[in-house]
Amino acid sequence: MDKTTKNDKNIIQITTVPSVLNLIYPPTCGICGKLDTNFLCNKCYKVLKKEAIYGIEKNQNEENLFDEHFYIFKYEGIIRKLILQYKFQDKSYLYKTFTNFLLKNEKFFQILKSYDTIIPVPISKKRYRERGYNQSYLLAKEIAKNIEIQLENDCLLKKINIVEQSKLNKENRVKNIQGVYELRNDKRLRKKSILLFDDIYTTGSTVNECCKILKKGYPIKIGVLTIAKD
């Protein structure tokens, strides 16, 4: 609480907002629910550490429109379960758990810092109203804040709501995603290195379509960062 003196008769002691929020919604580990200010307890951190790969892949496929791909996990087991909860079960707070785990790896952290700008893969307005948040934006915002790079959330927009990619095979995913994104404020991207963020990399159709649009802004490089790779 804020301190007052005996003469401050007309001053009401006010608890700071973060303290009040922590009392009402105490920070807990996103995995086990144990109280923890980092949203990730030591026990669950060790569980994630065993699953972590920290993959760094230079693009060698001519069909891909990005330069390199960074990912933390394989999309399986507990990671798959957490990502599905994060996206579809209203557990938006898991962005803090994922971010706090990622930032514990100093080497990976430094590589990401080499980029100028991070851009989250957008979702449609309809999907946003249904879900209440863009899972990629929450993580990208937290990463940008912690590694001190620029966050751009209004350059790449999704103008059309489509069938969820996870419900389609590879061929239909490519067709489904074509023409759904548009570029705005492209001058902000010129001569910048861009880190495109998405939650999962499966066939690459979503990030490649995004990269195709982003390249219209003439960036010098595009990297892709995902929580997991299928």
Image (tube, grey):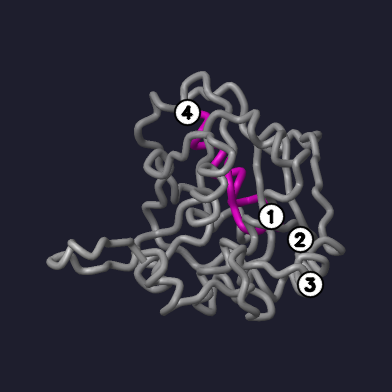
The residues bearing labels 3 and 4 have C-alpha atoms spaced at a distance of 45 Å
Q: Position of residue 29 (x, y in %)?
A: 64, 73
Badge 2 marks a residue whose secondary structure is loop
Question: To which quarter of the image does residue 22 belong?
Answer: bottom left
Residue pictured at 67% horizontal, 76% vertical: 31
The residues bearing labels 3 and 2 have C-alpha atoms spaced at a distance of 25 Å
Question: To which quarter of the image does residue 62 belong?
Answer: top right
> Of callouts 1 and 4, which one flags the residue occurring earlier in the amino acid sequence?
1
Residue 65 in sight from this viewpoint: no
Residue 127 in sight from this viewpoint: yes
Nearest the viewer among 29 and 99 is 29
In this view, 64 is above or below 168: above
The residues bearing labels 2 and 1 have C-alpha atoms spaced at a distance of 6 Å
Segment tinted magenta in the rendering: 196-216
The residue carrying mark 4 is 216
The residue carrying mark 1 is 201
